[in-house]
Image: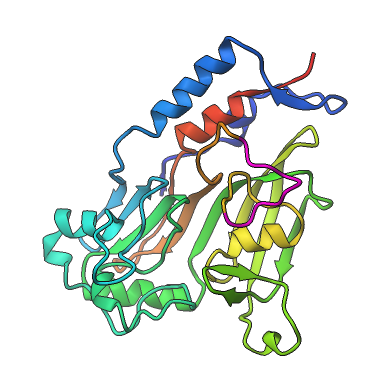
């Protein structure tokens, strides 16, 4: 079952590429017009879009800028959880002693703040998110995440051109406060957590950007962002892991990371593949780049 679709060809068709020329923002007046359309995208409703729903689960397309769950009991910022409880009040008690695929989160202390949550997306990341409507489906989904039988695919635009068109990044991740790192001392390696990420380059744009499909094997906080930085190609628009040699574009006001799809088994026994289109603001950002004549 396929719900929604992102066609790399259609995204790529918005570009003109000449490998011998550098890609730069196009000149006025069309550039200003596209920029205005990008800004308008950030003014739209922050409500999640329902991609799929049955009696056990709901799959949504989370917009960038919306947190998945409250950070603490006093956090009143709008979140996926607040939306979920408002629209599905009967699911407000869908909690467990431990839920989620993010091994870095202490779910036991904040289980009541995360009804229905079985995995997370960073605030800046958009895309597919699965919510459980009842405890049976919560346990069912939790088991799949723990066994790594759920397939998740992300789309990222990264700086530069990767040396290899595909590969796997195996690099332990260590928490340093609000940031994560793959660089650590020998003693720190003892507390670092295993992390692995598969990637495949789908398109390159001169020597400026690469459009990459990413499939995390593990679920560490900021894993994709940290791993792409670790190989010298941070994600475009990343406020935490960008590098000085790769300044973030002024006309992109978000992280270019989108949870494109998920393949998951349902409590009913069927397996679905759900997809979410690339957000309009990301597609419009790509439109602002043309090769120099």
In this rendered view, identify the residue nearer to me: 285 or 9. 285
Q: Looking at the image, how many numbered discs can be counted on the residues?
A: 0
Residue 225 horizontal side relative to residue 246, left or right? left
Quadrant where the C terminus is found in the figure? top right
Q: Residue at x 80, y 36 (%)?
A: 207
- Between residues 180 and 13, which one lies in front from this camera angle? 180
Q: In which quarter of the image is residue 188?
A: bottom right
Magenta residue check for 241: yes
Residue situated furthest top in the rendering: 29
Which residue, as the protein is rendered here, is positioned at the far right? Answer: 20
Left or right: 57 in relation to 119: left
The residue at the point 28 percent across, 56 percent down is 77
Dominant secondary structure of the residues highlighted in magenta in the image = loop
**Horizontal and vertical percent for residue 278?**
49, 38
Point out residue 48 in the picture as x, y percentages from the top left corner.
Answer: 30, 46
Measured from the top left, where is residue 141 in percent x and y? 36, 71
Coloring applied to the structure? rainbow
User: Residue at 50% of width from left, 43% of height from top?
Assistant: 254
Q: Give the range drawn in magenta.
A: 240-249
Q: Is residue 19 left or right of residue 267?
A: right
Comparing 196 with 179, the one in front is 179
On whether residue 63 falls in the magenta region, the answer is no
Instruction: Estimate the x, y position of residue 153 in percent, counting from the top left.
Output: 54, 54
Q: Which residue lies furthest to the left in this view?
A: 90
In the rendered image, the vertical position of residue 109 relative to residue 150, given as above or below = below
């Amino acid at each position: 079952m396929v719900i929604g679709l992102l066609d790399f060809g259609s995204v790529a068709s918005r570009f003109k590429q000449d490998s011998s020329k550098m890609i730069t923002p196009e000149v006025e007046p069309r550039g200003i017009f596209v920029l205005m359309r990008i800004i308008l995208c950030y003014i739209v409703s922050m409500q999640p879009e329902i991609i799929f729903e049955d009696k056990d689960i709901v799959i949504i397309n989370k917009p960038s800028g919306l947190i998945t769950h409250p950070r603490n009991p006093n956090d009143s910022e709008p979140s996926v959880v607040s939306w979920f409880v408002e629209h599905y009040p009967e699911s407000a008690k869908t909690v467990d002693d431990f839920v989620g695929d993010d091994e870095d989160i202490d779910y036991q202390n904040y289980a009541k703040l995360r009804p229905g949550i079985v995995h997370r997306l960073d605030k800046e990341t958009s895309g597919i998110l699965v919510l459980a409507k009842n405890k049976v489906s919560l346990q069912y989904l939790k088991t799949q995440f723990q066994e790594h039988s759920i397939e998740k695919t992300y789309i990222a635009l990264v700086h530069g051109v990767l040396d290899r068109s595909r590969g796997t990044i195996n690099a332990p991740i260590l928490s340093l406060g609000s940031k994560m790192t793959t660089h650590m001392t020998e003693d720190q390696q003892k507390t670092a957590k295993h992390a692995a990420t598969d990637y495949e380059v789908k398109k390159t744009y001169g020597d400026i950007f690469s459009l990459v499909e990413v499939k995390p094997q593990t679920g560490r906080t900021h894993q994709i962002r940290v791993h792409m930085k670790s190989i010298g190609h941070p994600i475009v628009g990343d406020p935490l892991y960008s590098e000085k040699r790769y300044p973030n574009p002024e006309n992109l006001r978000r992280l270019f990371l989108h949870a494109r799809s998920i393949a998951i088994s349902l409590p009913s026994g069927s397996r679905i593949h759900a997809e979410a289109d690339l957000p309009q603001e990301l597609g419009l950002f790509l439109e602002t780049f043309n090769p120099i004549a």
